[in-house]
């Protein structure tokens, strides 16, 4: 078992997090750096003082609407000033933020909003070109918020619309409000686990702040750094990593709604960004842009990235982020659990995922939970700044925790003699496509729901650039209609999934097989390992 004990460095701006909760950290920034830029986004830019003021006025309006400590408010907005202000206001009033995936369709929204018990949704009429109100209507959450109106029987107050042209959708004079405690719920994220539906992951103020501070220390961040990120803030990489990292180190958040090649390169150059937050797909998008090499992005110095050595090499050698940090983490463990130091040798950063951060402990175990010696591959388990359990029925926790507060990640790895983590495999059955976790069972159920499909199996196969792609194999029903024959079925099913799920859940390929073509185990079950080999061979 390894516990992080890295001593403070001379470059650390402050000896610890500047507050025990997110509102306390923001208050500290407002007091110490009021005129420094806090957020740059599509709607403009604001200072820390302006962020604090808008959050306080919006929080007062939320309180007048009946939102208070322990409530949950969904934020369904793209990256930008509005997202940060909305989240800051919700946290200031003592409620928890439920970041909602902007790609979700009605059925997915119904599950997330309903199971989290949100009392309000902060959104816009259209988000990233999608008719948000139509999707909310399909989910049963389109009721407009009206000040003074009584909530529904379920406590829902309605959807509060916030157009990009407004500084605030509603405001009241700032006033003292009950402060959240470090143990209070701050974020309720939904992440795909081994079940078909996303699991609710509760993240609390104190752990969020402490872990974010330590992640920033590994990057050697200082006040005035400018962190670029285009990953959606409804994912943990944004809201439970980049946001607390920026707050605890006084770093400006430079936000884009999505990574967009030439436009992103121009944005990074114009804003003189110093911190890079991008995974493999983001890096390849930038490197492959027609204008790559014509924008001065030499201000980029540090940041975090993953997952493969090639992904990291591109960041160092092509983007020139020479002090990029490699990492390993998951939403249930507050962002990152192991991070290399920005000043580590480059090969260490390319070939390992760094050492455990001081807020967590790590161990490698055999299937029975017995700790294994260094150099031996086993399951990665974490303790410390991790969740105590999922929010919901006890069965959600089954197989995820061990006695003593250890979180079972389901990922395989080993620790070397320098206590650095080497990740050698991903959690069983889970796919990670362009950095996004996807539960195969969810897609299999979607495909199996089509009347032309008898069986559906989803696996991950290596892509042309070493990434993972989601491929589905389906066995059609014998009584399939003419428009769902073997020739047309893949296109029909692609449209079927697109209409019912976020775009990233659409398989890159759908292959039609006969029952006899399915590889079986000795016990007669379909072997997904063998099926993966079959489908990988077909793409060659």
Image (tube, rainbow, N blue to C red):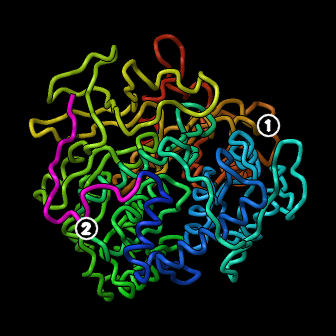
Q: Residue at x 73, y 69 (%)?
A: 124
Q: Residue at x 67, y 68 (%)?
A: 58
- Residue 69 drawn above or below residue 193: below
Query: In which quarter of the view is residue 100 placed?
Result: bottom right
In this rendering, does residue 489 appear at all? no
To which residue does mark 2 refer?
Answer: 302
Q: Nearer the viewer, residue 126 or 144?
A: 144
Residue 242 image offset from top left, x and y in percent: 41, 61
Q: Nearer the viewer, residue 178 or 454?
A: 178
Q: Residue at x 41, y 45 (%)?
A: 207
Left or right: 162 as drawn, with respect to 507 = right
Residue 451, label in figure = 1
Element class at badge 2? strand
Residue 101 image offset from top left, x and y in percent: 62, 55
Q: Could you tell me what secondary structure mostly forms the magenta stretch?
A: loop
Left or right: 1 as drawn, with respect to 393 = left
Element class at badge 1? loop
Residue bounds of the magenta highlight: 1-19
């Amino acid at each position: 078992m390894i516990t992080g004990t890295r001593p403070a460095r001379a470059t650390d701006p402050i000896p610890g997090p500047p507050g025990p909760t997110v509102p306390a950290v923001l208050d500290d920034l407002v007091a110490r750096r009021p005129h420094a830029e806090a957020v740059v986004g599509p709607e403009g830019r604001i200072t820390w003082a302006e962020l604090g003021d808008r959050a306080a006025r919006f929080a007062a309006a939320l309180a007048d609407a009946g939102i208070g400590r322990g409530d949950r408010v969904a934020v369904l907005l793209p990256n930008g000033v509005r997202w940060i202000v909305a989240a800051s206001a919700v946290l200031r009033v003592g409620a928890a933020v439920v970041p909602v995936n902007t790609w979700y369709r009605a059925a997915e929204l119904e599950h997330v909003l309903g199971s989290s018990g949100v009392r309000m949704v902060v959104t816009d009429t259209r988000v990233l070109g999608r008719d948000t109100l139509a999707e909310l209507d399909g989910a049963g959450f389109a009721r407009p918020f009206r000040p003074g109106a009584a909530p529904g029987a379920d406590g829902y107050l309605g959807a509060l619309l916030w157009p990009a042209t407004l500084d605030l959708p509603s405001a009241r004079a700032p006033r003292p409000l009950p402060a959240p405690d470090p143990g209070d719920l701050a974020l309720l994220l939904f992440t795909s686990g081994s079940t078909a539906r996303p699991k609710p992951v509760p993240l609390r103020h104190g752990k969020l702040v402490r872990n974010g501070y330590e992640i920033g220390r590994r990057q050697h961040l200082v006040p005035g750094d400018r962190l670029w990120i285009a990953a959606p803030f409804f994912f943990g990489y944004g809201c439970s990593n980049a946001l607390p990292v920026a707050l605890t180190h006084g770093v400006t958040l430079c936000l884009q709604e999505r990574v967009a090649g030439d436009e992103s390169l121009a944005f990074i150059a114009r804003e003189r960004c110093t911190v890079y937050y991008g995974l493999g797909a983001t890096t390849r998008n930038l490197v492959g842009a027609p204008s790559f090499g014509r924008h001065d992005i030499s201000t980029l110095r540090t940041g975090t990235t993953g997952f493969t050595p090639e992904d990291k090499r591109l960041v160092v050698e092509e983007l020139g982020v020479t002090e990029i940090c490699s990492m390993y983490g998951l939403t249930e463990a507050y962002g990152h659990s192991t991070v290399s130091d920005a000043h580590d040798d480059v090969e260490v950063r390319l070939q390992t995922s760094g050492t455990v951060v001081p807020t967590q402990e790590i161990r490698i175990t055999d299937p029975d939970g017995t700790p294994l010696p260094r150099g031996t591959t086993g399951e990665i388990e974490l303790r410390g700044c991790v969740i105590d359990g999922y929010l919901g029925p006890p069965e959600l926790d089954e197989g995820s925790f061990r006695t003593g507060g250890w979180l079972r990640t389901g990922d395989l790895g080993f620790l070397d003699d320098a206590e650095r983590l080497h990740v050698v495999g991903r959690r069983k059955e889970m796919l990670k496509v362009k950095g996004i976790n996807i539960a195969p069972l969810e897609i299999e159920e979607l495909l199996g729901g089509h009347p032309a499909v008898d069986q559906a199996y989803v696996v991950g196969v290596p892509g042309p650039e070493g990434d993972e792609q989601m491929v589905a194999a389906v066995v059609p029903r014998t009584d399939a209609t003419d428009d769902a024959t073997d020739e047309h079925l893949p296109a029909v099913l692609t449209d079927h999934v697109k209409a019912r799920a976020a775009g990233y859940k659409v398989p890159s390929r759908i292959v039609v097989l006969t029952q006899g073509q399915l590889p079986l185990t000795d016990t007669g079950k379909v072997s997904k390992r063998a099926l993966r080999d079959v489908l990988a061979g077909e793409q060659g």
